[in-house]
Amino acid sequence: MGESAELTEREQKLQGLGTAMLRREDARFIRGQGTYIDDIKLEGMLFGAIVRSPYAHARITAIDKARALAMPGVVAVLTAEDLKPVKLHWMPTAGGDVQAVLADEKVCFQYQEVAMVLAQDRYAAYDGAALVEVEYEELPAIIDPQQALAPGAPVIREDIADRKEVGHGPRTHPNHIFTWEAGDKAAADAAFAGAAVTVREEILNPRVHPCPLETCGCVASFNKATGYLTVYVTSQIPHLFRTVLAMLSGIAESRIRVVGGHRRWLRQQGADLSGIRRGDSRLDRHRAAGEMDRVAHRQSVHDRFCARLSLRR
């Protein structure tokens, strides 16, 4: 009896494997009280719809926006050519690479973003996207990573074809985009060399299908009067978002608010989301009290992304 009580006490203290964990988020979700990006409605807000490539590898020969722009409610149609004057057509990634925001002259994977339609409501945005006419010159596609590294394989990333190093290490092929190593290589090699038996195995990561409660989304609002930018985003890296937004926009990080994860406290406090655009003092007090999501700046992150931004064309 005493042994059982001792085991129970240990399990309660551990609160880890084999013990039930109290889920704090369930109550609001099962009651329909969750708050998502789609719930945010701001005055004068525009909606976006993406035009995507049906091809895995193709050169873009022409984009005709005329019919989409004539659609009632459509405000603008953006392509890489529209982003080039402000140098926003290529962005740094968290993996040490760069990526086209909208396909720049060619697409490198199926459903890559080619154009974005902005409209006064979601329906007009999607109707406009259906009217954007894109002409492609289809190129050979690669569906196997081993084939991608074969001699003479079609080069997918022409923008980095001549670089000797990218993604944390040296490259062995124009299609080789990432290398990652950690630990003591000499010690590891010595351990294998002295081992009685060594085993080599290639492990494939199969296709996975996550089922999040919320898909990727973003709502941004810039207050011209106060100079504050507020961004709601479904992301686990609000720190990086804030740093990169400051670097790209020229807005000081102290004037950028990145809200990631749940926004339950907004609903609990009865705050009007549009109040953020007006510089609502209640929200300022909440932020000062630490109730805004994590947006602290880290100098090391800033330095790392400065280096990546220099890779942009």
Image (cartoon, rainbow, N blue to C red):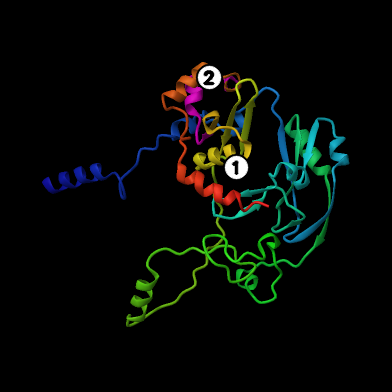
Asked if 109 appears above or below 195 in the picture, the reply is above
Separation (CA) of disc 1 from disc 2: 24 Å
| Residue 105 numbered tag | none
Residue depicted at 29% across the width and 44% down the height: 15
Which quadrant of the view contains residue 131? Answer: top right
Judging from the image, what secondary structure is the residue with disc 2 in?
loop
Q: Nearer the viewer, residue 85 or 189?
A: 85
Q: Which residue is mark 2?
A: 271
Counting from the top left corner in percent of width and height, residue 98 is at: 62, 53
Counting from the top left corner in percent of width and height, residue 119 is at: 76, 32
Q: Which residue is mark 1?
A: 216
Q: Find the residue positioned furthest to the left.
A: 2
Residue depicted at 50% across the width and 36% down the height: 261
**Label 2 is placed on what type of residue?**
Ala
Q: In the shown orientation, is residue 137 left or right of residue 284?
A: right
Asked if 200 appears above or below 277 in the picture, the reply is below
**Label 1 is placed on what type of residue?**
Cys
Q: Find the residue positioned furthest to the top.
A: 281
Counting from the top left corner in percent of width and height, residue 276 is at: 57, 22
Judging from the image, what secondary structure is the residue with disc 1 in?
loop
**Where are the magenta residues, as a range?**
259-275
Residue depicted at 68% across the width and 52% down the height: 313
Which quadrant of the view contains residue 120? Answer: top right
